[in-house]
Image: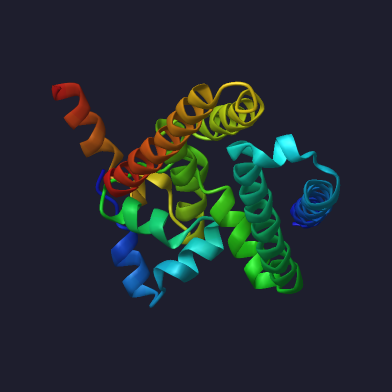
Amino acid sequence: MKTKIRELRREQKLSQEELAMAVGTTRQTITSIETGKYIASLPLAYKIARYFGLKIEEVFGLADYVQGEDKK
Amino acid sequence: MKAYRKTIQNRINLFSLLILIAAALGVYDTFFASEQIKASPMFNFQLGLTAALALMSLVGIFYNKLVLDDEQKLKKQYYKENDERMKAVKAKAGLPAVWVYSALMIVAGMIVGYFNELIFITLIAAAVVQLLLASVIQLIYQKIL
């Protein structure tokens, strides 16, 4: 799943470690979410979106992901 | 974080208890065990395992004390232990059930070992292979997820 986390982090000059500590997870998990290897749970996605002051769908590419899944 | 602090304190208490048990076993093995038991290959295995458990418990006490004294480290460890991705990885590798099965197999092997050496070796080998496989699967899933 594509996310805007990396861009948002860069805009705010935030490290993965800092974001991880702010949302209560580990740096490795943030890396996996950014690279699309791991899909965050709803509570974690909500925490990340809330941290950046955005809605979940504004941070995570949910529409593209669901369309891709439907095609399978 | 208060509840987690209590969990860490409980872990320290558990490690202390393990060290006491290991020390008691060590005293019994050295001074009170019969020559027949001492001659068994199981005796040395049990002695080694007890010493290793005591050493690991000691390291665990020091590590957890350090974590307790530092709020930042405590928070980091809490997030690490409750990380949803690692929980998913561990679930795929069959953990922590494999740890429990393996520990039970080792204990069973140690008891049976006094009667049949072949069963002891089989059980210990199976437990070790099981643990190794779970670790390898965990590493693979850590790369995938």
- In front here: A68 or B63? B63
Total count of labels: 0
| Rendered position, B74 above or below B114 | below
Identified at 70% across, 72% down, the residue is: B66
Image position, residue A70 (x, y; %)? 19, 22
Identified at 29% across, 65% down, the residue is: A7
Determine whether, in the image, residue B8 is placed left or right of residue B131.
right
Q: Residue furthest bottom?
A: A13
- The picture quadrant where one finds residue B141 is top left
Q: Residue furthest left?
A: A71
Image position, residue B13 (x, y; %)? 83, 53
- The picture quadrant where one finds residue A61 is top left
| Rendered position, B86 above or below B57 | above
- In front here: B135 or B48? B48
Determine whether, in the image, residue B40 is placed left or right of residue B24.
left
Image position, residue B37 (x, y; %)? 72, 36
Describe the colour scheme in one phrase: rainbow
Identified at 34% across, 65% down, the residue is: A8
Image position, residue A55 (x, y; %)? 43, 49
- In front here: B3 or B33? B33
Determine whether, in the image, residue A12 is placed left or right of residue B144.
right
> The N terminus of chain B lies in which quarter of the figure?
bottom right
> The C terminus of chain B lies in which quarter of the figure?
top left
| Rendered position, B6 above or below B138 | below
Identified at 49% across, 40% down, the residue is: B87
| Rendered position, B98 above or below B116 | below
